[in-house]
Image (spheres, grey):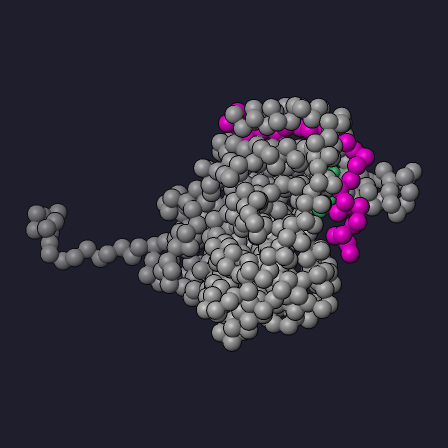
């Protein structure tokens, strides 16, 4: 080669930059703000991991795909951004079904990406081939196959957009192995720009309806408001607080709406809800459907004027007639109502003093009736005593997670989150096993927070092996197992229906010391048999700085009132 040729002014032909499907996935995840994926590996999906390395996305590998999906759901709840789980084809995807279904009923925005056999082997019987999209369609807002590598990032973004259509929920995307692994010229693949591929999800309600609601509230003598899940989903805490304070309206909270007002707040009510629903003249239901938790709407006084506000058009007026329905963002709507009502010379706030006092008296009566059980010194430990101790232990920075049957029903009555967004339960699917994955997501997203989780011994067992993942990723939390060696919530119904002598069928577990399980996996564990030992054990778990399980042996033969009323089936 001559010197002339080496320095020739002729430009070298530029190699076209190529990019693989997995790397396009990672770019689209990054554009959505996803900083962590929950996953269990498989040969169909490894190119996504490789893309995550380039984009700086953390990969948390779990021991069961159900955990990955629940963690993505939990991530969405804690952060207000979309969660993401990545699972392999076939059994990886079927294992994740429960987590996706739970997110659908809980209105939690998450994307599940599943592997799939190569398109070139479509319907030939490739390893782990199943009709994933057909399986996922009824439990997602959007389910699709990526047909070409150029479309990978575009379809990931489309799936994210669909998560936010109406009330949020999950999307599913399967990516065939050859589509994921193939490389295409970078400039042929559409990679949507962060923030550029969907509209704001905040929709203002109809102004005329807002005026009407302001009128109703201003003139109400006995109003009450139920602040549901969507208050937290849409981060409407401040708007809700402002409304109840300005208009002096008693507030009840459910699901993730719990903690919107702190316990002790003059507008925070809980134990008088049934009384309020029976006696109120105006009832405003925000961001929660008339499902079984609401007796399908039948538990509201037939004489009350009922208003329903929801993100989803399909939810308003479902199962029960409403007098006014408003579709849109709860925060924007509540703020607009406060503003409309504040313009009046008298917004009626002072006239509602007697109503608030009436409800407070009901609350106090119910609370005092229960208090002796919360202080019970009995051994075996009364479940009310356990949940009372947990409630006292929580700080403003404790995220509380409940995963179980009867024991969690007890805790729903007594445990009060001290801050907004610090309460996590499965939601209306009632899925046992969300506990460990929710702990994972919460501690990963908010390392500054303390995470406290109460498990039934039955519930813990479904996903308990991922305690090891918490150890591996150094995600400490305070765990408590309310151990009655039973699936007690179900046992109660069997005893009531078939008699005491036939109640122990299919619901009895071994006497497992879960503290030892925790220690075996590298965590902190203790056994508790006496009520006075609960608090010190919780403190030691807090101090340990490790994932922990305090195994508390509780009385097997007492049941929560909600379980005895079998309210979940009514
Ligand atoms: C995945 C799943 N399987 C089964 C059920 C039905 N179920 C509801 S409560 C319950 C018992 C749970 O037992 P445990 O967690 O020990 O709580 P306990 O009632 O004993 O306090 C069962 C099996 C469910 N909700 N979710
Ligand atoms: Mg149990």
Q: Nearer the viewer, residue 4 or 319?
A: 319
Q: Position of residue 51 (x, y in %)?
A: 41, 47
Q: Nearer the viewer, residue 275 or 145?
A: 275
Q: Position of residue 437 (x, y in %)?
A: 57, 41
Please tell me whether residue 193 is drawn above or below residue 419 in the rendered image: below
On the question of residue 318 being in view, the answer is: no
Q: Quadrant of residue 152?
A: bottom left
Q: Position of residue 226 (x, y in %)?
A: 61, 58
Q: Position of residue 384 (x, y in %)?
A: 71, 36
For the point 55% across and 71% down, the residue is 215
Q: Quadrant of residue 354?
A: bottom right
For the point 52% across and 71% down, the residue is 210
Residue 511 vs residue 305: left or right?
Answer: right
Q: Nearer the viewer, residue 420 or 164?
A: 420
Please tell me whether residue 482 is drawn above or below residue 418 in the rendered image: above
Q: Is residue 451 magenta?
A: no
Q: Is residue 551 magenta?
A: yes
For the point 71% across and 56% down, the residue is 275
Magenta range: 544-570
Residue 409 vs residue 341: left or right?
Answer: right
């Amino acid at each position: 080669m001559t010197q002339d040729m080496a320095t020739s002014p002729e430009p070298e032909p530029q190699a076209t930059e190529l990019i693989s499907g997995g790397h396009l996935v990672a770019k689209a995840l990054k554009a959505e703000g996803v900083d962590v994926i929950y996953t269990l590996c498989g040969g169909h999906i490894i190119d996504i991991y490789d893309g995550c390395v380039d984009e700086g996305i953390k990969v948390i590998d779990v021991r069961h795909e159900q955990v990955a999906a629940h963690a993505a759901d939990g991530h969405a709840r804690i952060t207000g951004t979309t969660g993401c789980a990545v699972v392999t084809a076939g059994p990886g995807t079927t294992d994740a079904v429960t987590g996706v279904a739970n997110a659908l009923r809980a209105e939690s925005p998450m994307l599940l990406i599943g592997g799939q056999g190569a398109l070139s082997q479509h319907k030939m019987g490739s390893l782990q081939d199943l009709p994933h999209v057909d399986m996922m369609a009824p439990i997602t807002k959007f389910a699709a196959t990526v047909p070409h590598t150029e479309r990978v990032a575009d379809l990931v973004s489309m799936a994210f957009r669909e998560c936010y259509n109406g009330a949020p929920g999950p999307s599913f995307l399967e990516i065939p192995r050859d589509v994921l692994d193939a490389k295409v010229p970078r400039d042929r693949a559409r990679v949507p720009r962060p923030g550029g591929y969907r509209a704001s999800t905040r929709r203002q309600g109809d102004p005329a309806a807002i005026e009407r609601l302001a009128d109703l509230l201003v003139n109400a003598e006995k109003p009450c408001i139920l602040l549901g899940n969507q208050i937290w989903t849409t981060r409407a805490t401040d708007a809700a607080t402002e409304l109840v304070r300005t208009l002096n309206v008693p507030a009840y909270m459910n699901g993730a709406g719990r903690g919107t007002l702190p316990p002790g707040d003059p507008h925070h009510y809980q134990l008088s809800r049934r009384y309020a629903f029976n006696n109120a003249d105006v009832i405003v239901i925000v961001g929660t459907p008339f499902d079984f938790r609401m007796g399908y709407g039948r538990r509201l006084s037939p004489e009350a004027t009922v208003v329903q506000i929801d993100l989803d058009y399909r939810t308003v007026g479902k199962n029960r007639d409403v007098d006014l329905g408003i579709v849109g963002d709860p925060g924007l709507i509540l703020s607009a109502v406060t503003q409309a009502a504040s313009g009046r010379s008298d917004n009626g706030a002072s006239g509602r003093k007697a109503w608030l006092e009436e409800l407070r008296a009901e609350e106090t009566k119910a609370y005092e009736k229960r208090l002796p059980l919360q202080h019970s010194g009995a051994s075996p430990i009364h479940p009310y005593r356990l949940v009372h101790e947990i409630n006292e232990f929580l700080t403003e920075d404790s995220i509380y997670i409940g995963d179980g049957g009867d024991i969690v029903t007890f805790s729903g009555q007594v445990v009060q989150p001290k801050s907004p967004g610090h309460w996590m339960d499965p939601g209306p699917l009632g899925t046992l096993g969300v506990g460990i994955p929710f702990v994972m997501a919460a501690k990963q997203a908010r390392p500054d927070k303390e995470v406290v989780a109460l498990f039934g011994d039955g519930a813990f067992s479904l996903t308990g092996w991922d305690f090891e993942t918490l150890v591996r990723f150094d995600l400490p939390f305070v765990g408590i197992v309310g151990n009655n060696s039973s699936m007690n919530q179900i046992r109660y119904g069997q005893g009531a229906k078939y008699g005491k002598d036939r109640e122990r069928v299919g619901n009895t577990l071994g006497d497992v010391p879960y503290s030892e399980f925790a220690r075996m996996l590298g965590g902190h564990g203790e056994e508790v048999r006496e009520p006075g030992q609960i608090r010190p054990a919780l403190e030691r778990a807090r101090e340990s700085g490790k994932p922990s399980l305090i195994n508390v042996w509780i009385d097997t033969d007492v049941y929560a009132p909600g379980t005895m009323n079998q309210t979940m089936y009514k």
